[in-house]
């Protein structure tokens, strides 16, 4: 999971969204010697592979959160740049300020700072680092294409290949039906082949990544199951394909899908054979997953006596309040803390037993505890439950009652010229232009994966009023 676990003293140390487990994946190893990561405020430094340690240090010691760290192409240079800038100007000149427990006593309030690409300077820096990395990758790729000293054995038949890497890659694709892509699409080829060879040496299938008792069983499995290919969902391999370096913050899947959309513009819009990939939502209290939202709500109500629909109705929760409540409960349980009484336990299983035995399942703390801006950020970035929350503002009965209570008065259209000059809409737009309300539409904003309301403008202003 992409986060640190909660500390026992009650401090919240989740640095970025967690992720529900899908499949194991080895951590990628970067080429060459990794530089150290420097804290922008103090002499603290850590190796790059221990970046979570520094991120936790920034959060706990300096109250700073950096958005979308995994999308920063060169994190050491990014940190070094901001170390110099923070010496020149106050932190508030660059960061958004988030106040926790904003409705509680002053002595319990804490101020955190968010550094993200909403700031033009930060976005420019990220784009320059991305461009620099792309240039380095293309230079490395060209060296490998021109390299005539390549020497390696085939990992399937031990035939020896020398001269150029393409001879080996083409041989594996032609003779063994093992294709990892065109040679010109690959970079850091030696390290790529080393990674694959290491998996085979450890008797691990390259596609399903299961481990077998001996090489003969592994070879038979890969041949019979047609598993002579790599697992495209394993992010370990992303760094070996040039396509992953082309655009800031985009994976090969996103770039590929954009290309597909352009091709589909000239084709027939026949969706008859399209099948939606089922979205699995995870229970708030256990590891149970369901492919439909009705099933997961029924499970939580039947197995854990937790009725989210009842809470929404009883507390009159708007959409973003439901989002904060779900993220709050997720985070408390992740940190082995009862969300009802705030008691901490040694493990997740023990806190679940406590919640059930003490009847705290439907017991929520005061709204000031969970209705905080920090819970706009998802605890689990692939939490499908967030995508299904009901928007009470769009409730049909509510719309009907509001429509009955609000009278509609037509403007006098006898003088169209006078209407254009004195229109209420024109005045509202003029006033809105003076206020210049920021909408914070940025690529790194945390809820880009949630449902889009019918009226985006209305809900954007609604969301801003929720925060401020």
Image (cartoon, rainbow, N blue to C red):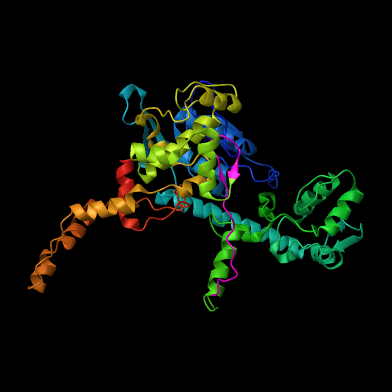
Indicate left or right for 334 with 392 as reference.
Answer: right
Q: Is residue 338 above or below residue 371?
A: above
Q: Quadrant of the N terminus?
A: top right
Q: Is residue 386 above or below residue 143?
A: above
The residue depicted at 38 percent of the width and 44 percent of the height is 320
Residue 133 x, y percent position in the rendering: 59, 54
Indicate left or right for 409 with 101 as reference.
Answer: left
Of residue 13 and residue 166, the one placed in the foreground of this image is 13
Of residue 74 and residue 464, the one placed in the foreground of this image is 464
Residue bounds of the magenta highlight:
270-289
Instruction: Name the residue furthest front.
Output: 302
The residue depicted at 50 percent of the width and 38 percent of the height is 301
Residue 200 can be seen in this image:
yes
Residue 182 x, y percent position in the rendering: 73, 66
Magenta stretch encompasses residue 287: yes
Residue 457 x, y percent position in the rendering: 32, 56
Residue 179 x, y percent position in the rendering: 77, 63
Q: Is residue 163 above or below residue 301?
A: below
Magenta stretch encompasses residue 25: no
Q: Quadrant of the C terminus?
A: top left
Residue 95 can be seen in this image:
no
The residue depicted at 81 percent of the width and 44 percent of the height is 211
How many numbered callouts? 0
- Our reading of the magenta stretch's main secondary structure is loop
Q: Is residue 231 above or below residue 258?
A: above
């Amino acid at each position: 999971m992409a986060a640190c676990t909660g500390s026992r003293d009650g401090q919240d140390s989740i640095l970025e969204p967690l992720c529900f487990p899908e499949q194991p994946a080895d951590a990628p190893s970067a080429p060459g010697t990794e530089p150290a990561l420097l804290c922008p405020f103090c002499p603290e430094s850590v190796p790059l592979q221990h970046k979570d340690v520094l991120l936790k240090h920034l959060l706990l010691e300096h109250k700073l959160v950096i958005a979308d760290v995994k999308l920063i192409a060169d994190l050491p240079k990014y940190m070094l740049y901001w170390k110099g800038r923070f010496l020149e100007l106050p932190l508030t000149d660059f960061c958004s300020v988030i106040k926790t427990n904003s409705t509680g006593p002053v002595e319990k309030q804490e101020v955190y700072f968010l550094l993200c690409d909403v700031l033009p300077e930060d976005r420019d820096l990220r784009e320059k680092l991305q461009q620099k990395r792309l240039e380095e990758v293309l230079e490395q790729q060209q060296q490998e294409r021109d390299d005539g000293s390549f020497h390696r054995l085939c990992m399937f038949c031990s035939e020896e290949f020398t001269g150029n890497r393409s001879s080996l890659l083409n041989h594996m694709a032609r003779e063994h039906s093992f294709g990892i892509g065109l040679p010109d699409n690959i970079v850091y080829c030696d390290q790529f082949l080393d990674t694959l060879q290491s998996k085979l040496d450890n008797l691990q299938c390259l596609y399903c990544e299961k481990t077998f008792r001996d090489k003969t069983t592994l070879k038979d499995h890969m041949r019979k199951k047609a598993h002579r290919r790599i697992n495209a969902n394993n992010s370990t391999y992303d760094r070996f394909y040039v396509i992953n370096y082309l655009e800031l913050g985009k994976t090969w899947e996103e770039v590929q899908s954009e290309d597909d959309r352009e091709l589909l513009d000239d084709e027939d819009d026949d969706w008859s054979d399209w099948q939606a990939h089922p979205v699995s939502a995870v229970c708030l209290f256990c590891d149970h997953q369901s492919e439909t939202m009705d099933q997961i709500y029924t499970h939580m109500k039947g197995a854990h006596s937790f009725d989210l629909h009842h809470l929404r109705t009883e507390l009159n929760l708007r959409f973003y309040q439901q989002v904060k409540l779900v993220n709050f409960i997720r985070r408390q349980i992740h940190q082995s803390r009862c969300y009802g009484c705030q008691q901490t336990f040694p493990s997740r299983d023990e806190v679940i037993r406590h919640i059930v035995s003490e009847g705290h399942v439907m017991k929520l703390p005061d709204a000031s505890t969970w209705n905080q801006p920090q819970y706009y950020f998802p605890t689990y970035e692939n939490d499908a439950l967030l995508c299904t929350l009901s928007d009470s503002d769009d409730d049909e009965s509510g719309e009907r009652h509001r429509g009955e209570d609000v009278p509609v008065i037509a403007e006098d259209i006898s003088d169209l010229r006078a209407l254009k000059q004195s229109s209420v809409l024109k005045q509202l737009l003029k006033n809105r232009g003076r206020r210049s309300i920021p909408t914070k539409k940025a690529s790194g904003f945390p809820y880009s994966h949630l449902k889009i309301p019918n009226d985006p403008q209305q809900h954007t202003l609604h969301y801003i009023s929720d925060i401020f």
